[in-house]
Amino acid sequence: MEENVNTISINGVSYVRADSVQAAPTGNRSVVVVDRGWIFAGDVKRENGRIRLSRAVWVLRWDSIGFDGVIANPKDKKVTIKIMKNKIDIPEGAEIFNVPVDDDWGL
C-alpha cells in the first residue's frame, strides 16, 4: 500500500513537502509592465520618481503560452526577448505592476 501525502497538519499548522516549494527570487531583478503595453525586465533601482533598469531586456512578444508562461520560462521558443544595449529609464507613474524574478531572468 502506498500513500501520497502532500500536506500534514500539526497543532493547527499545515506543512508541505520541501520539494514542492519554490524559493522566492532574491536580488532586485523584476519584470516591469508599464503603460502602453511595454514589458521590460532588469535590475531595478528606484530614485527621484524614476525606475532605472540595468542589464535590461525587452519582452517583445510571445505566442500561446500566456504571461505566466513567459515568467516561468523566458527562454521558450515562443518568447521573443531583446537585450537592450542601454539602461532603461521609466517614469515611476507609468508602472502598472512588476514581478520579481531570478537574477539572470531573460539574459
Image (tube, rainbow, N blue to C red):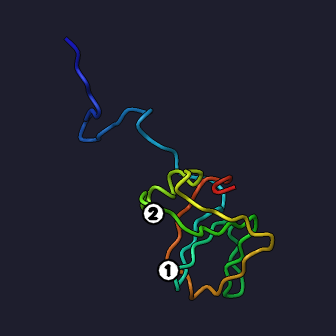
Q: Residue at x 35, y 36 (%)?
A: 16
| Label 2, label 1: how far apart the Cα atoms are | 14 Å
| Nearer to me, 84 or 101 | 84
Secondary structure beneath dot 1 equals: strand
Q: Residue at x 55, y 80 (%)?
A: 34
Q: Residue at x 61, y 53 (%)?
A: 102
In the rendered image, the quadrant that contains the N terminus is top left
Residue 76 image point, x, y percent: 55, 50
Left or right: where 27 falls relative to 12 = right
Say few, some or many: other residues with alpha carbon within 10 Å of mark 1 (under 14 / 14 to 19 / 20 or more). Answer: some
The mark that comes first in sequence, 2 or 1, is 2
Residue 64 image point, x, y percent: 42, 59
| Nearer to me, 86 or 29 | 86
Residue sticking out furthest to the left: 1
Left or right: where 99 falls relative to 15 = right
Residue 29 image point, x, y percent: 65, 61
Residue sticking out furthest to the top: 1
Say few, some or many: other residues with alpha carbon within 10 Å of mark 2 (under 14 / 14 to 19 / 20 or more). Answer: some
Give amino acid for label 2: Phe
Task: State whether residue 21 is above or below residue 34.
Answer: above
| Nearer to me, 81 or 104 | 81
Q: Which residue is mark 2?
A: 67
Residue 22 image point, x, y percent: 48, 43
Q: Which quadrant would residue 94 be assigned to in this image?
A: bottom right
Task: State whether residue 54 is above or below residue 49.
Answer: above
Q: Which quadrant would residue 2 be assigned to in this image?
A: top left
Q: Residue at x 46, y 55 (%)?
A: 69
Q: Which residue is mark 1?
A: 96
Secondary structure beneath dot 2 equals: helix
Give amino acid for label 1: Ile
Left or right: where 44 falls relative to 64 = right
